[in-house]
Amino acid sequence: MRQYSPRFYILLSVGAALFTMAVKFIGYFLTGSVGLFSDAAESIVNLVAALVGLWALTLAARPADEDHAYGHTKSEYFASGVEGALILVAALFIIWEAIPRLLHPEPIEQAWLGLAFSVSGAIVNAVLAWFMFRAGKQQRSITLEADAHHLFADVITTVGVLVGIVLVALTGWYILDPLIAIAVAINIVWTGIKLLRETGLGFLDTALPREDQDQIRAVMKHYEEQGIAFHAIRSRSAGHRRFISFHVLVPGNWTVLKGHTLCEEIELAIRKTLPGSTVFTHLEPKEDPTSWEDTTLDRVEQQIE
């Protein structure tokens, strides 16, 4: 399957947000349902989130420069953080709008016609979200994954509203409309919280996932069998890019050229195993005690007597 850039998918998301916002508001105006209003209101949030994602991906694509030697890929975390916050805001707004209708239930007009418009928007979001989530995983783009989660939350909202309006139409219990809207809002709060958590982990330079670390260890094991040692292994993510650093301990009688050649070979092996990685190595002699005093983030200082 042809692989498109993250910007391509986010531009599709902008177009989808404009389309779904239009059809869902038509559905709301036809019915007056607070459930459909909550669904339509979330489409506005989708549009804002997609535009923020477009900005983040545009910035992340910039190459490293003098002021940003590690590149700009961490900007993707801003987009996922904004998406998470907007989801929470949308949920609170839905609840705010549903409470008056909960106290004073009103009938729903032209329920089936309104639902047709809302469901058409949900289908568009569901298809796009599936492709975006898949592309986000393949390209390690937290912006695409966040937008996909957001679109899935929108689909869940529509499904909940659909159930509520069908029940109202069948039973005549108008209070079900705001109750379903509140239930849907509470459900999508969890999606927003998960996105904010992932954003926080990215800003805190959390280590790479366990499966990535296992692959790094597998590369190192091949060299450990040859008498090479490793320590001070550290890793982090910045958007789709990985950063990996560690110390390589070799016999002290090796030449600088031989040690450097080995480090280059190890770095290349890890980059092939984990594409999109920047690898830093530090060469040390195994026999020197000071080589074993810097395994932590700050070197252990020797006591001067």
Image: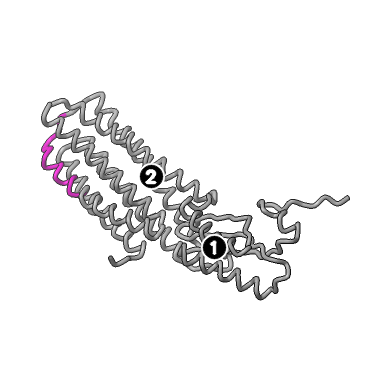
The color scheme shown is: one colour
Q: Residue at x 63, y 63 (%)?
A: 227
> Is the residue marked by circle 1 packed among few (<14), some (14-19), or many (20+) residues within 10 Å?
few
Q: Is residue 174 above or below residue 260?
A: above
Camera sees residue 68: no
Locate residue 181, reporting x and y percent.
Answer: 26, 34
Q: Residue furthest bottom?
A: 257
Q: Residue at x 21, y 28 (%)?
A: 176
Bounds of the magenta segment: 107-121
Q: Point out the tag, 1 or 2, that comes first from the N-terminus.
A: 2
Report the predominant secondary structure element of the magenta stretch: helix
Locate residue 38, reporting x and y percent.
Answer: 27, 39
| Magenta stretch: includes residue 279 | no
* Mark 1 or 2, closer to the camera: 1
Q: Which residue is mark 2?
A: 86
Say which of 3 and 45 sits in front.
3
Tell me how far mark 1 sits from mark 2, CA to CA.
Answer: 47 Å
> Is the residue marked by circle 2 packed among few (<14), some (14-19), or many (20+) residues within 10 Å?
many
**For residue 175, what is the image quadrant?**
top left
In terms of secondary structure, where does tag 1 sit?
A: helix
Left or right of residue 150: residue 244: right
Q: Which residue is mark 1?
A: 222
**For residue 180, what is the image quadrant?**
top left
Q: Disc 2 marks which amino acid?
A: Leu
| Magenta stretch: includes residue 109 | yes
Say which of 296 and 190 sits in front.
296
Q: Disc 1 marks which amino acid?
A: His
Locate residue 182, reporting x and y percent.
Answer: 29, 32
In terms of secondary structure, where does tag 2 sit?
A: helix
